[in-house]
């Protein structure tokens, strides 16, 4: 639940008030007395006796929005006509569409775009499949694939309920990198079916973005698809998160004048995101890391380790710490949370090393209150948009895929992820760098181009048939 009014819970209330008196001024007062924020007040129809007004305001959640409506209705003379949830209005009919890039105004244009002219293009591709990248949408198209099993913080809600999120992802691809992405929501959570389905639709795409597939299933899906396909497969929940965390941590450590090779890092979360973040931090030079899941520290002595947890135990926690998260946080220089809300307090942050860095990324409710963490930490980052230093995957995936598609890459490598993280960190200049600005805004104009250039350069040695055209 949001703690302050948010545009995510924005409503527009259409109502009528008497034309005279103080009714109009009382509307704003009613919203504010209910704890909401008026963002617009538009008179849509005026008469001698009545005014029709649209009052747009932000609430904390749906219950708060209803409380605001009740407060408005209690104003003398007010008649409520309609209440619209602006977020639902944005989603009516979906958020994306397909449209033709070429005109179809006459018979000549039709005969070139479709039959009979298109047959010559098809035969050219039949002779050389690589021409599909040059002559079709393949060169600029990504499939956003989900099984609906781990959608945002909502859990296993199914493919239909995942579709609005996948549409949003596709819209972000287009907005930030000019990529045409399409939601593929699968009505199966069977690994074999997911892998086979993606394999057989892959010829129409230049890349596969796996999204919101639960762990540990997502690890096997990604591994098998990478072995089967000749196009890059990228699991954003893992690798997009890892890129953003490493970029932000690189700059945060500059702020506190510490190095990744010497700091003690405690992580909460050993799922898809936690596993990928850990691997990239280790690749970047981290040496002293302890990872905790809901049972406590991951260590070699535990008898419940699956393949993923065994890898973590083999590559972290050299001292064999076997206690809980609170104990692991004591004396740590860095805390990275990709787990669950409210598992730490301000006192836990106070027990960390001097000038600690806290990344509490559970969303919408972080592992520790950002306000409490900021009382003790030198740098705090969250996954939320209402605090500084938002760790948001949109900083990574559009640029990553732009670079992969431009290079006609066939795989995603760890070197590409490191290059992307380095480029993202470098968008923040030394003059801008500070405790409240370790990662650029998602709307920073240089983000996607910088990340794309770094990935493209890293992929150059592996790309097939890459040309500047």
Image: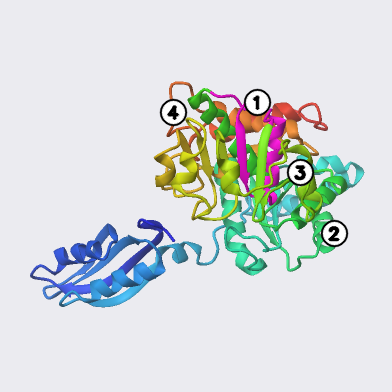
Pick whichever of labels 2 and 4 is earlier in the sequence. 2
Residue 434: give its label.
Answer: 4
Q: CA distance from mark 2 to mark 1?
A: 41 Å
> Residue 217: x, y in percent?
77, 57
Q: Residue at x 75, y 30 (%)?
A: 459
Q: Which residue is mark 3?
A: 313
Pick whichever of labels 1 and 4 is earlier in the sequence. 1
Residue found at the far left of this picture:
21
Q: Secondary structure at mark 1?
A: loop
> Callout 1: few (<14), some (14-19), or many (20+) C-alpha neighbours within 10 Å?
few
Q: Secondary structure at mark 4?
A: loop
Pick whichever of labels 3 and 1 is earlier in the sequence. 1
Residue 453: give its label.
Answer: none
Q: Nearer the viewer, mark 2 or mark 3?
A: 3
Q: Magenta segment: does it hold 13?
A: no
Pick whichever of labels 2 and 3 is earlier in the sequence. 2
Q: Secondary structure at mark 3?
A: helix
> Residue 357: x, y in percent?
51, 35
> Callout 2: few (<14), some (14-19), or many (20+) C-alpha neighbours within 10 Å?
some
Q: Which residue is mark 2?
A: 196
């Amino acid at each position: 639940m949001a703690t302050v009014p948010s545009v995510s819970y924005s409503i527009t209330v259409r109502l009528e008030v008497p034309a005279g008196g103080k009714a109009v001024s009382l509307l704003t007062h009613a919203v504010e007395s209910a704890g909401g924020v008026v963002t617009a007040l538009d008179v849509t129809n005026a008469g001698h006796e009545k005014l029709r007004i649209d009052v747009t305001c932000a609430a904390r959640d749906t219950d708060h929005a209803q409380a605001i409506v009740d407060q408005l209705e209690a104003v003398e003379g007010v008649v409520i006509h309609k209440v619209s949830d602006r977020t639902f209005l944005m989603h009516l009919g979906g958020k994306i569409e397909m449209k033709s890039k070429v005109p179809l105004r006459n018979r000549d244009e039709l005969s070139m775009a479709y039959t009979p002219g298109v047959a010559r293009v098809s035969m050219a591709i039949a002779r050389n499949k690589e021409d599909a990248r040059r002559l079709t949408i393949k060169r600029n198209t990504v499939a956003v694939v989900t099984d609906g099993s781990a959608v945002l913080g909502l859990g296993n809600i199914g493919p239909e309920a995942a579709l609005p999120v996948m549409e949003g992802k596709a819209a972000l691809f287009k907005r930030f990198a000019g990529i045409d992405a399409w939601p593929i929501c699968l009505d199966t959570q069977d690994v074999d079916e997911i892998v086979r389905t993606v394999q057989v639709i892959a010829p129409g795409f230049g890349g596969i973005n796996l999204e919101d597939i639960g762990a540990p299933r997502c690890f096997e899906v990604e591994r098998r698809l990478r072995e089967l396909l000749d196009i890059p497969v990228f699991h954003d929940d893992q690798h997009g998160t890892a890129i953003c965390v490493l970029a932000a941590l690189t700059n945060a450590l500059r702020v506190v004048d510490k190095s990744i090779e010497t700091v003690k890092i405690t992580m909460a979360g050993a799922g898809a995101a936690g596993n990928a973040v850990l691997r990239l931090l280790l690749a970047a030079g981290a040496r002293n890391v302890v990872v905790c899941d809901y049972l406590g520290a991951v260590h070699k002595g535990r008898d419940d380790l699956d393949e993923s947890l065994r890898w973590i135990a083999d590559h972290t926690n050299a001292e064999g710490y076997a206690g809980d998260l609170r104990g692991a946080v004591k004396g740590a220089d860095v805390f990275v949370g990709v787990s669950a809300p409210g598992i730490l307090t301000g006192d836990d942050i106070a027990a960390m090393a001097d000038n600690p860095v806290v990344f509490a990324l559970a969303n919408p409710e972080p592992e520790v209150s950002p306000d409490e963490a900021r009382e003790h930490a030198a740098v705090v980052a969250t996954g939320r948009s209402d605090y500084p230093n938002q760790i948001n995957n949109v900083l990574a995936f559009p640029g990553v895929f732009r670079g992969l598609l431009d290079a006609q890459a066939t795989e995603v490598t760890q070197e590409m992820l490191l290059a992307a993280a380095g480029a993202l960190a470098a968008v923040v200049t030394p003059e801008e760098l500070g405790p409240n600005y370790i990662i650029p805004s998602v709307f920073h104009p240089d983000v996607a181009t910088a990340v794309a250039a770094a990935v493209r350069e890293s992929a150059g040695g592996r790309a097939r048939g890459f040309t500047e055209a």
